[in-house]
Image (cartoon, helix red, strand yellow):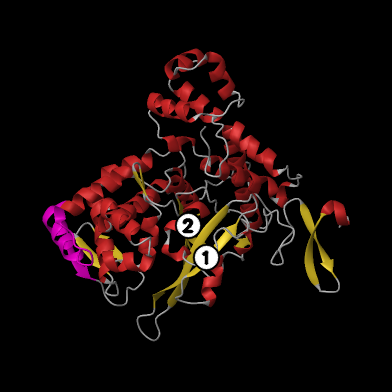
Amino acid sequence: MARGSAGRKVYAHAKLRRLRREHGMNQVDMARALGISTSYANQIEQSQRPLTASVLLRIAEVFGVDAEFFSEADEDRLAADLRAALADEACGAPLPPADEVAEAARDHPEVARALVALHRRYRDTVEQAAALGGTPGPAGALLPPAEPHDEVRDFFYAHHNHFEPLDAEAERTAGLLELRPGKAADPLVALLAERHRVRVVQAAAGRTGDARRFAPDSGLLFLSPWLSDGQRAFQLATQLALLEHGPLLTRLADGAAGLTSPQAPALARIGLANYFAGALLMPYTAFHTVAEEVRYDIELLSARFGVGFETVCHRLSTLQRTGRRGVPFSFLRVDRAGNISKRQSATDFHFSRLGGTCPLWTVYEAFSAPGRILTQVAEMPDGKKYFWIARTLTRGGFGHHAPRAEFAVALGCELRHAHRLVYAEGVALDDPRAATPIGLGCRICERRDCAQRARPPAGGRLAVDPDRRAYVPYPVESTGV
């Protein structure tokens, strides 16, 4: 019998119903194509029977989808989004139980998505009204488009952070150029000059904010003088993608249903160009092979392919090629204030959009141990466990008065994959006491026994303990507060 990643039975009725309708079939047609009885097909669509392994394989064959199509990751993420929307204190409604929210997302995904989208527009309206000093304009004037960066992040998440057409093109180009790790810049400079009449020049030292600037009229590509060899090659590869694979980038971005704001497709094309650059410098097959050999040792991979720690982490989160999958990772980059500037995921780990993230997450502890790689077994409120590694990075600082930026990057996977990582050696993965309870942020976290809580738990409030002068979480019904 087919089971999800946590050993749960797979009830894929909503996705199967959508597939059937997209192919213009009724239940009788589908049952005949799958070689099952009509009553069995009806029971699957009514969520009365789970999918068996044989039926799952037959569905994949008949409808031309990968078995990963029925992964619960999308449902879990949608349920987290819906719960966050319902937990918003501005909505003023009591929070339904977590299992009912999960059931709604599983059984009625389109309705759940519509509610989440409605809530986001509502929050945008409230925030803009507050910014205008409580004097909203005409009806409809306070309904701005969705945040383009969030739309692009959703776009990458929906593809599990993997774009096979770009990976294939990058791998082909790397083979033709015979790129050598750490020495890819010169062949790329020559290729840009030969094919596109682009001349690469070093920018003035004062322009430290621009790693790459292209002047199409003159055909000059300005690169920062402070770039390392790997960073220089990455910027050259990004420009190559924009010039040579523009139609492919546009087709991938413009074909995304979720990119509704005017700026989102352009941002997506830049993100896809960066994806191509990483895939060119770390071709899929070679990179995956070495990653498995060194047990995903990021520093060894960085030395082997001549790129930085963060670039390797990002590439590791994209290894989802059918038939040659790597460990499915989630990747993010944060600053000390908790602002997430990068987040990509090939797993079902969900990054909160509302109310920040959890201060108990090891990515924030990394700032207290600069340059060291920290590990953590983290348990979410729903019982799912993940293995995380985190480390700080410093940007800039070329000169005594030059500004520096410090970030922490984190890479995580489901605990069941942790044994494949060199970082898990010596960690008691099977010991429940080794897990740190974390959440998606205090606004929507259900934990009531967290000493780090900054606001009331979802469905409850905080009471003041006069002896400790601290806020202690209690359920509303217990305190009447």
| Residue placed under numbered mark 2 in the picture | 418
Of 124 and 426, the residue lying toward us: 426
Q: Identify which amino acid the numbered label 2 is placed on.
A: Ala
Q: Can residue 196 be seen in this view?
A: no
| Residue placed under numbered mark 1 in the picture | 427
Q: Identify which amino acid the numbered label 1 is placed on.
A: Val
Of 233 and 74, the residue lying toward us: 74
Residue 285 in percent (x, y) is at 27, 51
What's drawn in magenta, residue-wise? 176-202
Which residue is found at the position 29% from the left and 67% from the top?
231
Please say if the residues under marks 1 and 2 sit with CB atoms less than 8 Å apart.
yes
Residue 364 in the image: above or below residue 137? below
First in residue order: circle 1 vs circle 2: 2
Residue 472 in percent (x, y) is at 79, 64
Count neighbours of disc 1 (C-alpha within 10 A) and say few if under 14, some if 14 to 19, many if 20 or more.
some
Q: Is mark 2 on a helix, strand or loop?
A: helix
Residue 113 in percent (x, y) is at 57, 38
Q: Magenta stretch: residue 179 in it?
A: yes
Q: Magenta stretch: residue 334 in it?
A: no
